[in-house]
Image (cartoon, rainbow, N blue to C red):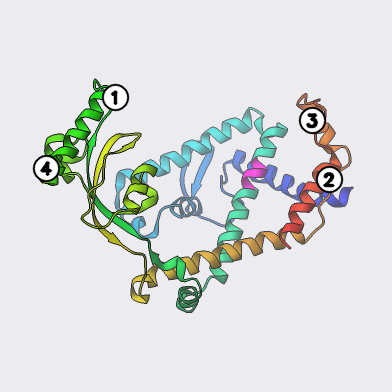
Amino acid sequence: MLKRKTGRVIAWLAIPLFFAQTASGTSLGLPRDSEAFAYQGPVTVTQADLDAYLDRIPEEHRGGFLLDNERLAQAIENLLLVRLLGHQAIENGLLEEPVVQGSLYQTAMVYLADERRKRYLDENMLDDYEQQARELYLTQPSMFEVPASLSFSHILVNRGQGRGELEAMERIFEVYEKLQDGAEFDALVGEYSDDPYVDDNQGSYENVALDELEGEVAQALQLMQPGQISEPVLSDHGWHIIRLDARDDSRKLSWEEAEDQAREIARNQHREELVDSLYRDALQAHPFRIEPGSVEKLLERYGVRDAGRPTDDSISEQASGADRQGE
């Protein structure tokens, strides 16, 4: 029993040590050798504290930040304020509360886990992914295709908004009859179309994938040839008369066109594989165990008494199953 708690006990011992230093005013950073930078009452901001703060700022912006008197002063003031409030919390006994201790431990573990992940990636990511990118380009050609697209123009007649169904139908067939009599499509767009973007695009849309269109409009366009004008088509937006202007079939990108995308995909895939490997190895390094009765105590503490509630065995089985899926 005591052996399983040792790691946690060490962590609990580290937290009071950390805050004991805080209360004495020596430092509000984790125990480390670092010169003091600024003081305010019982608290101190160290050079290392500022390094930790600056680490959150992208490297290319740090110089500008450090040259900005107002921003630097504000950062130091914010660091001191957090430490002053933390000092007050310690004096008021918050550090003795189990929930506060649990939150501190969780925060520390999350930070350390994130640092472990980032450093593991830094150590194992490749400098260049050209070889992997070329393999992807050759073996997964569907990833590097320009999808088929259509360019079309339409005249839209809205239903509703003060216009009844019959009036809308009469209006769209008036347009259709004029087209049948030889009227110019583009001229009728400006006169009849209710498309909200008609002033900007004159009713024309270029390089649109079929899956981006309403079903009725897409279905009509699929059956048309370039230059052909449809009969009236009803969709949720209203009545359309559509002209297919161009049809572009899908095509594979050249290597030059696809290279940047392929490199990024290869890099991201390798990154995901590394993270999965890191997590899997950590989870499988030691067997999963629940202290007998722990689930029951947790549920009782929160008043959960429903039938079919989790048990030690059900949680152990679920967690063990998740571990096996990663094997």
Is residue 20 something that shows in the picture? no
User: Where 157 falls versus 33 (above or below)?
Assistant: above
Assess disc 2: are there few (<14), some (14-19) or many (≥20) residues with their C-alpha within 10 Å of its C-alpha.
Answer: few
Q: Which residue is mark 2?
A: 290
Q: Is residue 109 left or right of residue 160?
A: right
Q: Position of residue 293 (x, y in %)?
A: 88, 37
- Choose between 127 and 315: the one closer to the eye: 315
Assess disc 4: are there few (<14), some (14-19) or many (≥20) residues with their C-alpha within 10 Å of its C-alpha.
Answer: few
Q: Which residue is mark 4?
A: 181
Q: Which residue is mark 1?
A: 165
Q: Secondary structure at mark 1?
A: helix
Q: Which residue is mark 3?
A: 299
Comparing labels 2 and 1, the label whose residue is closer to the camera: 1
Circle nearer the N terminus (2, 1): 1
Q: Which residues are magenta?
A: 104-108
Q: Is residue 26 left or right of residue 66?
A: right
Assess disc 1: are there few (<14), some (14-19) or many (≥20) residues with their C-alpha within 10 Å of its C-alpha.
Answer: some
Q: Position of residue 316 (x, y in %)?
A: 82, 47
